[in-house]
Image (tube, rainbow, N blue to C red):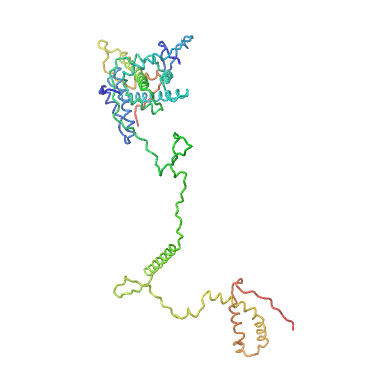
Amino acid sequence: MADPAVSSGGSLNAGGRGSGGKAASSPAENYHLARRRTLQVVVSALLTECGFESAEKAAVETLTEMMQSYITEIGRCAKAYCEHTARSVPTLSDAVVTLIEMGFNADTLPVYAKRSQRMVITAPPVTNHPVAPKALSAGQKRTHPAHIPGHFPEFPDPHTYIKTPTFREPVSDYQVVREKAASQRRDVERALTRFMAKTGETQSLFKDDVTAFPLIAARPCTIPYLSALLPSELELQTLEETDSSEQDDQTDSENTAGNGITDDPGADKENSILPPSGVVPSVKVSEDNVIDNPYLRPVKKPKVRRKK
Amino acid sequence: MVTPSADTSVSNGVYVPGSITNGDVKPAVSTTPLADFLMQLEDYTPTIPDAVTGYYLNRAGFEASDPRIIRLISLASQKFISDIANDALQYCKMKGTASGSSRSKTKDKKYTLTMEDLTPALTEYGINVKKPYYFT
């Protein structure tokens, strides 16, 4: 490799290195910049060889850029030539043909090489190659089965082709479910009573300490026994259902009783007001049966008028 | 594979083989001179370190089996830049002596490469550079 004998014009060096290192952050960038700087030094050395004492920064930058793209282009073109002939490793001939294609007179090379060369630039000090960041891998890749040759690429990460449902199967063990239900109910009751205690009126268990055990204050009703007497909604409904089946039997009797009452208007009004006991349930039933909702009324059978 | 013979010239960056202008076909010459030259390259180290050239060649996809090819390429690019620099030097000297300054001493030894000299030198190679004089 190169001997450490660096010699180049001082002013050229200063002009050349000034532009290099402003935003270098990652090691890859440093790696790249180091080589770029080396190219700049080389260009400066070549200019010194030609006889220049100093150079404009823009000119040195231009020449550096040209040199870098020249090398890159030779590499690309030589590779293309070599692959064009169904080879994979470039040889000397590929390089020569590339140089010819780029308009370079290759015969003058030996002459140029034997010039009084004096400058040799050291290689950049960066020795470790920046590793390309590995793609995030989750899990172990599957190994190749026997029928796949070894030089084929690896399998992708298992998460790319294995689907895992993200929910867990609910527990169906009876004991666990019972316990869960019981604890949930307990928690709900506690939370609800606490909420009602905090938002509503409370009575305290201890006289001194009001906040220790708050009890939900009881609201006294005016007539406590009223709820016991009145049938609830459900009871009302069942009552109607059972009575509607009896109404069919009593319809005729009611009609006859009603006719009887109308035929005899002169009868005691008190008697009419106080209906006979047999008709009491029917009257009550008739009052209950008059519901506003036509769909809830029981079926009305047509009156059969018997011709007398 | 035809190697260009020595009397052909490079102009405008386009390589014109002599056979086309002369009308007769030159005999194909093998690349043995360069192959011999390659042997000599083992001792000689070009100005550009092998690592740098190899780095840029690798970026282009060129993986060299023989380190001498890398040296050949680095030498070629060196010569490329040197030729341009020499042309720029000629321009610089022309501008200096054209005004008829003192002939007794050679024009001051301090030559500075400026864009004004570099641009016409590059134009001869077919490379047009336009650098803005200022940056806003």
* Residue B118 visible in image: no
Residue A181 coordinates in the image, percent (x, y): 43, 64
Residue at 38%, 38% in the rendered image: A134
Residue A146 coordinates in the image, percent (x, y): 47, 38
* Residue A264 visible in image: yes
Q: Quadrant of residue A42?
A: top left
Q: Nearer the viewer, residue B131 or A144?
A: A144
The answer to whether A42 is drawn above or below residue A263 in the figure is above
Q: Residue furthest right?
A: A308
Quadrant (top left, top right, bottom left, bottom right) of the C terminus of chain A: bottom right
How many numbered circles does the render carry? 0
Q: Nearer the viewer, residue B88 or A49?
A: A49
Q: Quadrant of residue A277?
A: bottom right
Residue B124 coordinates in the image, percent (x, y): 40, 17
**Left or right: A228 as drawn, with respect to B134:** right
Q: Quadrant of residue A64?
A: top left
The answer to whether A244 is drawn above or below residue A37 in the figure is below
Q: Nearer the viewer, residue A138 or A12?
A: A138
The answer to whether A217 is drawn above or below residue A35 in the figure is below
**Left or right: A219 as drawn, with respect to A17:** right
The answer to whether A188 is drawn above or below residue A45 in the figure is below
Q: Nearer the viewer, residue A238 or A270?
A: A238
Quadrant (top left, top right, bottom left, bottom right) of the N terminus of chain A: top left
Residue A307 coordinates in the image, percent (x, y): 74, 82
Q: Residue furthest front?
A: A146
